[in-house]
Image (tube, rainbow, N blue to C red):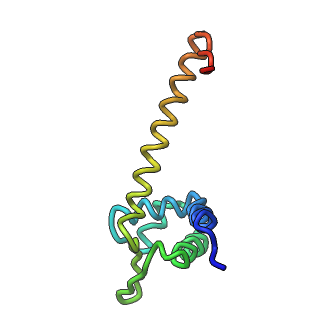
Amino acid sequence: MSTPLYQLKAEFFKTLGHPARIRVLELLSEREHAVAEMLPEVGIEPAHLSQQLAVLRRANLVVTRKEGSTVYYSLTSPHVAELLRVARTILSGVLAGQAELLADLQAGRPEAKPPS
C-alpha cells in the first residue's frame, strides 16, 4: 500500500519547518553557494549548518558539487524557489490583514461582525 499524497506533503512541509533550512533555500534560490558563503548568512554553527544541509539533501531539495575542497550547493528544481515566493506572497497578505486589525484595535474602532 502506498503512502497517501497528503502524508507525503506533510512530511515535505516538516522538512521545510526549520528557519535555517528556509534561509538556506532562500540563499540557493538566488544562486549556487559554497558552505562557507552560507555560514554568515544563516548565522548558525558550521556543524549545525552541515546537519541542516544533510536534511535538505535527503529530501532531494538540494544537490552538491565539489570543486577542489569546496562544496557548492544548489537547488534541485526552480520550483523550490517558486514555492518560497508563493509563501512570501501568502504571508504578506496575512500580515497585511493583521496590520489592518491592529490599526483598528489601536484606533478603538469596533470589531466588524462576522457574516451570518
- Which residue in the rendered view is the most extreme toward the bottom? 68
Q: Residue at x 44, y 47 (%)?
A: 88
37 or 58: nearer the eye? 58
| The image quarter in which residue 105 lies | top right
| Residue 77 drawn above or below residue 86 | below
| The image quarter in which residue 74 lies | bottom left
Horizontal and vertical percent position of residue 114 = 62, 20
| The image quarter in which residue 14 lies | bottom right
Task: Identify the image quadrant of the C terminus.
Answer: top right
Q: Residue at x 62, y 69 (%)?
A: 4
Horizontal and vertical percent position of residue 81 = 39, 60
Horizontal and vertical percent position of residue 104 = 56, 16
Residue 6 falls left or right of residue 36: right
Q: Residue at x 37, y 62 (%)?
A: 29
Horizontal and vertical percent position of residue 23 = 49, 59
Task: Identify the image quadrant of the N terminus.
Answer: bottom right
101 or 21: nearer the eye? 101
Number of marks in the rendered image: 0
Answer yes or no: is residue 58 visible: yes
65 or 85: nearer the eye? 85
Q: Residue at x 39, y 66 (%)?
A: 28
- Which residue in the rendered view is the most extreme toward the right? 1
Answer yes or no: is residue 44 visible: no
Residue 104 falls left or right of residue 73: right
- Which residue in the rendered view is the most extreme toward the left? 31
